[in-house]
Image: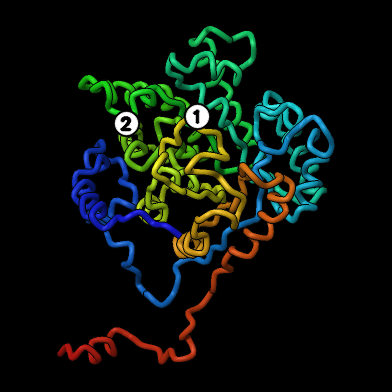
């Protein structure tokens, strides 16, 4: 497994975090706990008893994101059939694409608790839970650079095509409806994309005018703030998938956005290591830095095989011929043993959701193999320390005597 050299980057990062944006948050705004890594608060290792966990949480799963499987043929063409199929594959939960009318009526779900109870009931009868809703396609349309207008129109209904303002308004309402539906379903986290205004200027050529990126992120935050406030009203976390094509595509850009929404409590991350492999980002360090903002987990594999002809950019090649490729679980280079260990150590108790994307393997094979892969990697967290058998008991006076501290 390849890991990009990162020792020098970590040293540089420490200096950057010393001036991290949350230090300048408005008075009273809570800094994320991961600010403590740079000395911004109490150490995350400071616990009353280092031998015992303060909580006991085990990752839930396996679950499956249904977006890549919904279709016009059975068993993928109805909610009843696809949830039964997912259970048969070995899944205990499903993540539901809110835009797919074959499976879900978002308008009804946003206003009808009875309908949401019916959705949950059908899933439960087939042996699975609804883990989260997704608005990846609608969230993308909250912010679209004009260069992508024609390409992204297909994500919206025909009545808003070729009208960016109407399309954006439609997208905002869609995400808000999905948050309301999540509340009706009893779900506490929601998956989405941020959209992008600055993405065409990712590479600094031609030279970016001063203030261009800042203006893009100011506008992005302005568009999302009302949605985040609605998420707060619903009691649902908005989990942005950190993804190429989005203005939130790595940790730095997430922080830029987080600062502009005043460290909003509902502004969180969907962690997917595959996207970090393809941009040579340290996906393990990322967990430690953002562990208090990671509220959702896509389990997806990838590989990066640079040659003398192509690297990260991929040379405009299709997925089979790109240096960076998504793969079925276990076929790529992601170190999932380390990821699941870190998630367990960080008390992540969300779902491990398989997002199948592979340029080689059949999706149904990838789905069945993925369920067992996740099941084999989930760590059932211990409720006690392994050395409890040697616990002799103690008190404050005994501690002082052991340290040679005189009364």
Q: Secondary structure at mark 2?
A: helix
The residue beneath circle 1 is: 230
Q: Where is residue 265 drawn, in percent x and y?
A: 41, 41
**In terms of image quadrants, where is residue 191?**
top right
What residue does disc 2 label?
A: 260
Q: Residue at x 45, y 33 (%)?
A: 315
| Figure quadrant of residue 27 | top left
Q: Is residue 407 above or below residue 329?
A: below
* Image coordinates for residue 102, horizontal then vertical, percent: 76, 29
Marks 2,1: beta carbons within 8 A: no
Residue 274 vs 343, above or below: the answer is: above
Camera-nearest residue between 147 and 86: 147
Q: Quadrant of the C terminus?
A: bottom left
Left or right: residue 316 versus residue 259 is right
Q: CA distance from mark 2 to mark 1?
A: 17 Å
| Of residues 335 and 194, the one drawn nearer to the viewer in this rendering | 335
Question: Could you tell whether 407 is left or right of 152 in the image?
Answer: left
Quarter holding residue 379: bottom right
Residue at horizontal 47%, vertical 43%?
323
- Can residue 229 be seen? no
Task: Identify the residue shown where x is 66% and y is 50%.
Answer: 63
Q: Is residue 107 visible?
A: yes
Residue placed farthest to the front in the image? 308
Q: Left or right? Give the position of 58 relative to 42.
A: right
The location of residue 82, given as percent across then percent down, is 78, 41
Which percent across, then down, holds residue 69?
71, 38
């Amino acid at each position: 497994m390849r890991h990009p050299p990162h020792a020098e980057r970590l040293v540089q990062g420490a200096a950057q975090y010393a001036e991290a944006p949350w230090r300048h948050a408005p008075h009273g705004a809570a800094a994320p706990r991961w600010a403590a890594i740079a000395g911004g608060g109490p150490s995350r290792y400071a616990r009353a008893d280092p031998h015992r966990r303060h909580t006991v949480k085990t990752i839930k799963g396996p679950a499956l994101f249904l977006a890549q499987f919904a279709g016009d043929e059975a068993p993928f063409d109805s909610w009843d059939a696809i949830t039964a199929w997912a259970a048969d594959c070995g899944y205990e939960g499903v993540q539901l694409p809110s835009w797919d009318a074959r499976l879900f009526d978002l308008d009804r779900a946003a206003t009808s608790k009875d309908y949401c109870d019916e959705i949950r009931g059908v899933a439960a009868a087939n042996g699975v839970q609804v883990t989260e809703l997704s608005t990846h396609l609608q969230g993308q349309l909250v912010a679209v650079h004009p260069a992508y207008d024609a390409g992204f129109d297909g994500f919206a209904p025909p009545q808003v095509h070729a009208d960016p303002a109407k399309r954006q308004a439609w997208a905002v309402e869609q995400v808000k409806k999905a948050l309301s539906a999540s509340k009706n379903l009893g779900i506490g986290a929601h998956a989405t994309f941020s959209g992008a205004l600055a993405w065409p200027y990712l590479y600094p050529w031609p030279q970016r005018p001063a203030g261009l990126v800042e203006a893009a992120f100011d506008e992005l935050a302005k568009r999302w703030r009302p949605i985040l406030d609605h998420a707060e009203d619903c009691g649902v976390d908005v989990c942005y998938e950190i993804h190429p094509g989005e203005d939130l595509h790595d940790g730095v850009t997430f922080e830029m956005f987080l600062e502009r929404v005043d460290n909003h409590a509902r502004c969180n991350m969907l962690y997917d290591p595959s996207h970090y492999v393809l941009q040579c980002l340290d996906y393990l360090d990322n967990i430690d830095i953002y562990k208090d903002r990671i509220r959702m987990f896509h389990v997806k594999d990838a590989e990066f095989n640079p040659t003398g002809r192509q690297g990260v950019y991929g040379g405009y090649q299709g997925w089979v011929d790109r240096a960076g490729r998504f793969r079925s679980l276990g076929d790529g280079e992601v170190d999932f043993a380390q990821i699941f260990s870190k998630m367990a150590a960080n008390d992540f108790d969300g779902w491990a959701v398989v997002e199948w994307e592979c340029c080689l393997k059949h999706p149904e094979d990838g789905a069945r193999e993925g369920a067992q892969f996740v099941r084999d990697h989930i760590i059932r967290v211990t409720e006690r320390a392994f050395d409890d058998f040697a616990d002799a008991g103690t008190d404050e006076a005994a501690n002082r005597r052991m340290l040679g501290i005189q009364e």
